[in-house]
Amino acid sequence: MKSLRVHEHGGTEKIVIDEIPEPAPKANEAVVKIAATSVNHLDIWVRGGMRNISLPLPMVLGSDGAGIVAEVGSDITDLRVGDRVLISPGTSCGRCEECLSGHDNLCREYKILGEHCDGTDAELVAARRDNIVKLPDGMSFNDAAASSLVFITAYQMLVEKAKVQPLEEVLVMGASSGVGTAAIQIAKLHNARVIAVAGSPEKLEKAKALGADEVINYSTEKISDGVRRLTGKRGVDVVFEHTGQATWSDSILSANRGGRIVTCGATTGP
């Protein structure tokens, strides 16, 4: 079957279409025929290589995938061939204290598909049953494939770490990104007031459509000045930060006394 792989780090020219063996499911796995995948910033980091981090190569790229169950392992009784499903990108041992307490991302064996092991950019992917989620009838493969990695990341940041509360003010940096659009929706689900930051009117309109209450165009206004304007100089309760060097000073200046800043990366540098 065909897959997208990198055999060495570098630019986009390092991505090759490879023929690899079709997977056979273990007893607790199902094979999914992939209908849609997505591209995350993580794919860029994996392809280009990350400083002081050794990744196994060759690597099938892709952390997100949605499709149709093609084969089911012998221990699985609640999936059928033909079911529409989403593959969740995080895998863990399922046995340790962290896994059993619901903190599987803290498992010593935690891995992300397409980073620590082969990912979803292939025609067929074998995944453990606990990494497979049935899709509701109204959700397309494209929407599903664009959701999993960014939503579990944003949920961990806002709900598990920042513990966002109703009526709190949340500043979402990079609001038009995958993780940013997820953050807007999760914050609104928790009845917070969302201030979204992006660099163009088109991106800000999208943020509003997703539920943002206020927006700041960083190309025309300093972010921390916009926050002071929109919060009566108080600052926000939570800063959702993931861009790094370009916004870090504004993130600190935008938080109120006792505010929380959560981050998952630094796409513009440390």
Image (cartoon, rainbow, N blue to C red):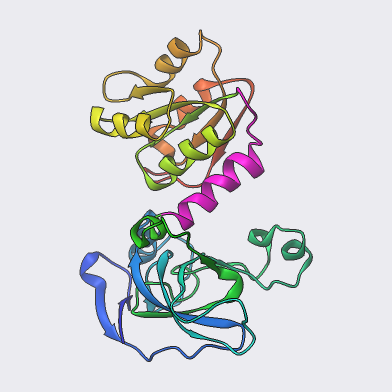
- Nearer to the camera, 134 or 175: 134
**Residue 123 is at least partly visible in this image:** yes
- Nearer to the camera, 7 or 81: 81
Q: Does the magenta stretch include residue 230?
A: no
Asked if 243 appears above or below 145 in the picture, the reply is above
Which of the image's four quarters has the N terminus?
bottom left
- Name of the residue lying farthest toward the front: 137
- Name of the residue lying farthest toward the left: 13
Residue in the picture at 28% in, 67% down = 10
Residue in the picture at 68% in, 67% down = 108
Asked if 61 appears above or below 182 in the picture, the reply is below
Asked if 126 appears above or below 195 in the picture, the reply is below
Q: What main secondary structure does the magenta stretch of the protein show?
A: helix
- Nearer to the camera, 55 or 236: 236
**Residue 38 is at least partly visible in this image:** no
Which of the image's four quarters has the C terminus?
top left
> Where does residue 69 sit, x and y in percent of width and height?
45, 78
> Where does residue 256 sit, x and y in percent of width and height?
59, 19
Residue in the picture at 41% in, 32% down = 247
Range covered by the magenta-colored residues = 147-167
Q: Does the magenta stretch include residue 161?
A: yes
Q: In this view, does 150 lie to the left or right of 176?
A: right
> Where does residue 246 sit, x and y in percent of width and height?
38, 34
Residue in the picture at 36% in, 62% down = 141
The quadrant where residue 103 appears = bottom right
> Where does residue 24 sit, x and y in percent of width and height?
48, 91
Q: In this view, does 238 lie to the left or right of 222?
A: right
- Name of the residue lying farthest toward the right: 97
